[in-house]
Amino acid sequence: MQNQRRSVLKKMAATLAGITGINAIAKAAAPALPDSAPQGEIVYDQDVPLFSSFRVHGNMVFVAGIGAHFEGDIKAHTDHVLKEMEKVLIKAGSSMNKVLKVSVFLHDLNDYKAMNEVYKGRFGSNPPVRTTVAVYGGVPGDSLVEMDCIATL
């Protein structure tokens, strides 16, 4: 029994060492961000930062999930989310045409078709790759849809 525990602990230590080494390599390979690089608005909850609205890393922009927290249907929520996404991307120095990946989280999969009607054409003629899922338990804040994205500068 004790030998099995030692074996498991050795494997865990080796795994952690490997992860640490990979993280060190990735950090060393990543270009340093200039002090003037936009870093996004930090969202706070009772003086504890929860997340940044976006982060710039190298020539990439990572935009946090955006929802619509008001009464309305899926089309109104989708339109609002996409307009807010565009504002964040512009603030970060990017645009909707430079989005590579979008994740869409729907409160109800039955809203898929209506969401697509509003989504279509918002990213130019070469749309990004996309993943769409219905979220068990709903989207936080009673939004009917939430989206995040990854773009280039």
Image: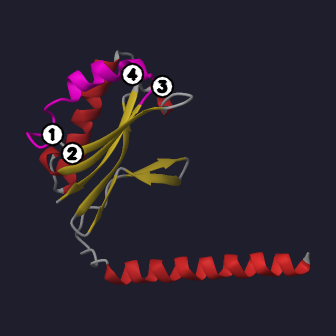
The magenta stretch spans residue 113 = yes
Front residue (pair 100, 147): 100
Q: Label 4 is placed on what type of residue?
A: Phe
Which numbered mark, 2 or 1, is in the foreground of this view? 2
Task: Read off the magenta span.
Answer: 106-126
Q: In this view, does 47 lie above or below 86?
A: below
Confirm or deny contact between disc 1 and disc 3 (CB under 8 A): no
Residue 145 placed where, x, y %? Answer: 38, 29
Query: Magenta segment: does it hold 67?
Result: no
Q: In the rendered image, which residue does mark 2 sit on?
A: 128
Q: Which of marks 2 and 1 is nearer the N terminus?
A: 1
**Residue 126 placement, left or right of 108:** left
Give the crowd class for mark 2: few <14, some 14-19, many >=20 residues within 10 Å: some
Circle 4 residues within 10 Å: few <14, some 14–19, many ≥20:
few
Q: What residue type is labelled 2?
A: Pro
Tag 3's secondary structure?
A: helix
- Residue at image mark 1: 123
Is label 4 in a helix, a strand or a loop? loop
Label 3: few (<14), some (14–19) or many (≥20) C-alpha neighbours in 10 Å:
some
- Horizontal relation, residue 26 to residue 31: left or right: right
Q: Where is residue 27 in the image (x, y as percent from the top left)?
A: 39, 79
Q: Earlier in the sequence, mark 1 or mark 3?
A: 1
Amino acid tagged 1? Phe
Mark sitting earlier along the chain (3/2): 2
Q: Nearer the viewer, residue 72 or 130?
A: 130
The residue to which callout 4 is attached is 70
Residue 142 — which label?
Answer: 3
